[in-house]
Amino acid sequence: MSSSEIAPLVATGFPVLGVAAWSGTGKTTLLEALLPILQERGLKVGVIKHAHHTFEVDTPGKDSYQLRKAGASPMLVASHQRYALMQETPGQQEPDLNHLLALMAPHAPDLVIVEGFKAWPLPKLVVYRQEVGDPAILDDNGVCAAALKRTDIRPLSKTVARLDIDDVPGIAEWVHSFMRRQEYL
Protein backbone atom coordinates (compact mmCIF):
# COMPACT_ATOMS: atom_id res chain seq x y z
CA MET A 1 0.00 0.00 0.00
CA SER A 2 1.52 3.31 -1.03
CA SER A 3 1.22 6.46 1.06
CA SER A 4 -1.36 7.81 -1.39
CA GLU A 5 -3.52 4.70 -0.81
CA ILE A 6 -3.51 4.72 3.00
CA ALA A 7 -6.92 3.93 4.43
CA PRO A 8 -8.22 5.39 7.66
CA LEU A 9 -7.68 3.20 10.71
CA VAL A 10 -10.49 0.78 11.36
CA ALA A 11 -12.09 0.48 14.80
CA THR A 12 -9.89 -1.82 16.85
CA GLY A 13 -11.52 -2.08 20.27
CA PHE A 14 -8.26 -0.90 21.87
CA PRO A 15 -6.37 2.39 21.74
CA VAL A 16 -3.60 2.75 19.17
CA LEU A 17 -0.76 5.22 19.67
CA GLY A 18 1.88 5.91 17.07
CA VAL A 19 5.41 6.70 18.18
CA ALA A 20 7.25 8.60 15.50
CA ALA A 21 10.80 9.90 15.36
CA TRP A 22 13.74 10.16 13.06
CA SER A 23 16.27 7.34 13.19
CA GLY A 24 18.80 7.88 15.97
CA THR A 25 16.46 9.97 18.12
CA GLY A 26 16.09 7.35 20.83
CA LYS A 27 12.53 6.07 20.31
CA THR A 28 13.52 2.44 20.90
CA THR A 29 15.42 3.42 24.06
CA LEU A 30 12.36 5.34 25.24
CA LEU A 31 10.03 2.40 24.49
CA GLU A 32 12.38 -0.02 26.31
CA ALA A 33 12.09 2.16 29.42
CA LEU A 34 8.37 2.92 28.99
CA LEU A 35 7.04 -0.61 28.45
CA PRO A 36 8.03 -1.98 31.91
CA ILE A 37 6.39 1.03 33.60
CA LEU A 38 3.16 0.47 31.69
CA GLN A 39 3.35 -3.24 32.52
CA GLU A 40 3.78 -2.39 36.23
CA ARG A 41 0.51 -0.44 35.92
CA GLY A 42 -1.15 -3.67 34.84
CA LEU A 43 -1.36 -2.81 31.15
CA LYS A 44 -0.88 -5.32 28.36
CA VAL A 45 0.84 -3.39 25.57
CA GLY A 46 1.36 -4.75 22.08
CA VAL A 47 3.87 -3.19 19.69
CA ILE A 48 3.89 -3.12 15.91
CA LYS A 49 7.27 -2.10 14.49
CA HIS A 50 7.71 -1.01 10.89
CA ALA A 51 10.96 -2.04 9.22
CA HIS A 52 12.16 -0.22 6.14
CA HIS A 53 14.28 -3.13 5.02
CA THR A 54 14.22 -6.87 4.49
CA PHE A 55 14.72 -8.82 7.69
CA GLU A 56 14.84 -12.41 8.90
CA VAL A 57 13.30 -13.55 12.16
CA ASP A 58 14.55 -17.09 12.02
CA THR A 59 18.03 -18.49 11.58
CA PRO A 60 19.36 -19.89 8.31
CA GLY A 61 19.84 -23.63 8.69
CA LYS A 62 16.99 -24.07 11.19
CA ASP A 63 13.95 -26.10 10.14
CA SER A 64 11.58 -23.12 10.22
CA TYR A 65 13.87 -21.12 7.95
CA GLN A 66 14.33 -24.01 5.54
CA LEU A 67 10.58 -24.70 5.37
CA ARG A 68 9.73 -21.04 4.84
CA LYS A 69 12.33 -20.78 2.08
CA ALA A 70 10.86 -23.94 0.55
CA GLY A 71 7.47 -22.22 0.28
CA ALA A 72 5.60 -22.57 3.58
CA SER A 73 3.51 -19.43 3.93
CA PRO A 74 2.56 -18.82 6.62
CA MET A 75 5.17 -20.58 8.69
CA LEU A 76 4.49 -20.85 12.41
CA VAL A 77 7.13 -22.09 14.81
CA ALA A 78 6.19 -22.66 18.47
CA SER A 79 7.71 -23.74 21.75
CA HIS A 80 6.57 -23.67 25.36
CA GLN A 81 7.96 -20.11 25.67
CA ARG A 82 6.81 -18.36 22.47
CA TYR A 83 5.60 -18.69 18.94
CA ALA A 84 6.34 -16.75 15.79
CA LEU A 85 4.22 -16.55 12.68
CA MET A 86 6.07 -15.65 9.50
CA GLN A 87 4.07 -14.63 6.46
CA GLU A 88 5.72 -13.85 3.16
CA THR A 89 4.35 -10.70 1.47
CA PRO A 90 5.94 -10.61 -2.01
CA GLY A 91 5.00 -7.63 -4.12
CA GLN A 92 3.56 -5.68 -1.19
CA GLN A 93 4.85 -2.11 -1.26
CA GLU A 94 4.15 -1.32 2.39
CA PRO A 95 2.50 -3.27 5.21
CA ASP A 96 -1.21 -2.63 5.78
CA LEU A 97 -1.51 -1.31 9.33
CA ASN A 98 -5.21 -2.21 9.54
CA HIS A 99 -4.35 -5.85 8.79
CA LEU A 100 -1.56 -5.84 11.39
CA LEU A 101 -3.88 -4.33 14.02
CA ALA A 102 -6.43 -7.04 13.25
CA LEU A 103 -3.70 -9.61 14.03
CA MET A 104 -3.31 -7.98 17.47
CA ALA A 105 -7.03 -8.14 18.34
CA PRO A 106 -7.14 -11.81 19.48
CA HIS A 107 -4.46 -11.01 22.06
CA ALA A 108 -6.73 -8.38 23.70
CA PRO A 109 -4.10 -5.69 24.34
CA ASP A 110 -4.95 -2.67 26.48
CA LEU A 111 -2.92 -0.54 24.07
CA VAL A 112 -1.01 -1.04 20.83
CA ILE A 113 2.00 1.17 20.20
CA VAL A 114 2.82 1.53 16.52
CA GLU A 115 6.43 2.45 15.83
CA GLY A 116 6.92 3.86 12.37
CA PHE A 117 4.00 4.10 9.91
CA LYS A 118 4.46 7.90 10.02
CA ALA A 119 2.06 8.48 7.11
CA TRP A 120 -0.88 6.64 8.69
CA PRO A 121 -3.58 8.83 10.26
CA LEU A 122 -3.27 7.86 13.91
CA PRO A 123 -2.61 9.74 17.14
CA LYS A 124 1.12 10.12 17.62
CA LEU A 125 3.70 10.73 20.29
CA VAL A 126 6.70 12.28 18.55
CA VAL A 127 10.15 11.82 20.04
CA TYR A 128 12.26 14.75 18.87
CA ARG A 129 15.84 15.89 19.36
CA GLN A 130 16.79 19.11 17.61
CA GLU A 131 20.17 17.66 16.60
CA VAL A 132 18.49 14.74 14.75
CA GLY A 133 16.11 15.07 11.83
CA ASP A 134 13.68 17.63 10.49
CA PRO A 135 11.44 19.52 12.96
CA ALA A 136 8.56 19.27 10.46
CA ILE A 137 7.79 15.90 12.10
CA LEU A 138 6.26 17.96 14.94
CA ASP A 139 3.75 19.55 12.56
CA ASP A 140 1.90 16.35 11.62
CA ASN A 141 -1.77 16.88 12.39
CA GLY A 142 -1.90 13.56 14.29
CA VAL A 143 0.66 14.64 16.90
CA CYS A 144 -0.86 14.58 20.40
CA ALA A 145 2.38 14.89 22.36
CA ALA A 146 6.05 15.60 21.78
CA ALA A 147 8.86 14.31 23.97
CA LEU A 148 11.68 16.83 23.79
CA LYS A 149 14.70 17.80 25.84
CA ARG A 150 13.78 20.24 28.59
CA THR A 151 16.12 22.81 27.00
CA ASP A 152 14.36 22.64 23.60
CA ILE A 153 12.05 25.65 23.61
CA ARG A 154 10.59 24.90 20.19
CA PRO A 155 7.02 26.22 20.01
CA LEU A 156 4.33 23.55 19.69
CA SER A 157 0.68 23.71 18.78
CA LYS A 158 -1.61 24.36 21.76
CA THR A 159 -3.12 20.89 21.22
CA VAL A 160 0.25 19.12 21.57
CA ALA A 161 1.36 18.07 25.06
CA ARG A 162 5.02 18.91 25.78
CA LEU A 163 6.77 16.02 27.56
CA ASP A 164 10.30 15.83 28.93
CA ILE A 165 12.15 13.16 26.93
CA ASP A 166 14.11 12.21 30.08
CA ASP A 167 11.01 11.83 32.30
CA VAL A 168 9.86 8.34 31.39
CA PRO A 169 7.42 8.06 34.35
CA GLY A 170 5.87 11.36 33.21
CA ILE A 171 5.55 10.01 29.67
CA ALA A 172 3.96 6.84 31.08
CA GLU A 173 1.44 9.02 32.94
CA TRP A 174 0.65 10.87 29.70
CA VAL A 175 0.16 7.52 27.85
CA HIS A 176 -2.17 6.30 30.60
CA SER A 177 -4.10 9.58 30.38
CA PHE A 178 -4.23 9.24 26.57
CA MET A 179 -5.75 5.79 26.99
CA ARG A 180 -8.41 7.10 29.39
CA ARG A 181 -9.30 9.85 26.90
CA GLN A 182 -9.80 7.14 24.29
CA GLU A 183 -12.44 5.62 26.61
CA TYR A 184 -10.98 2.13 26.52
CA LEU A 185 -9.96 1.80 30.21
Image (cartoon, rainbow, N blue to C red):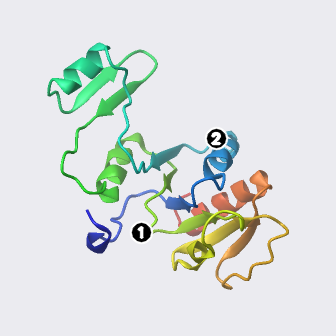
Q: Earlier in the sequence, mark 1 or mark 2?
A: 2
- Taking the spot 20% from the left edge, 20% from the top edge, the residue there is 67
Dot 2 corresponds to which residue? 39
- Percent x, y of residue 40: 69, 40
- Percent x, y of residue 108: 43, 45
The residue type indicated by label 2 comes to Gln
Between label 1 and label 2, give the one nearer the viewer: 1
Instruction: Tell me the tag on residue 119.
Output: 1
- Percent x, y of residue 123: 51, 69
Q: Secondary structure at mark 1?
A: loop
Q: Residue furthest right?
A: 151
**Horizontally, is 159 left or right of 94 in the view?**
right
- Taking the spot 73% from the left edge, 72% from the top edge, the residue there is 162
Label 1 Cα neighbours within 10 Å, binned few <14 / some 14-19 / many ≥20: few
The residue type indicated by label 1 comes to Ala
User: Which residue occupies the foreground of this view, 8 or 107?
Assistant: 8
Q: Secondary structure at mark 2?
A: helix
User: Mark 1 near mark 2, Cβ–Cβ under 8 Å?
Assistant: no
User: Which residue occupies the foreground of this view, 3 or 178?
Assistant: 3
Which quadrant is the C terminus positioned in? bottom right
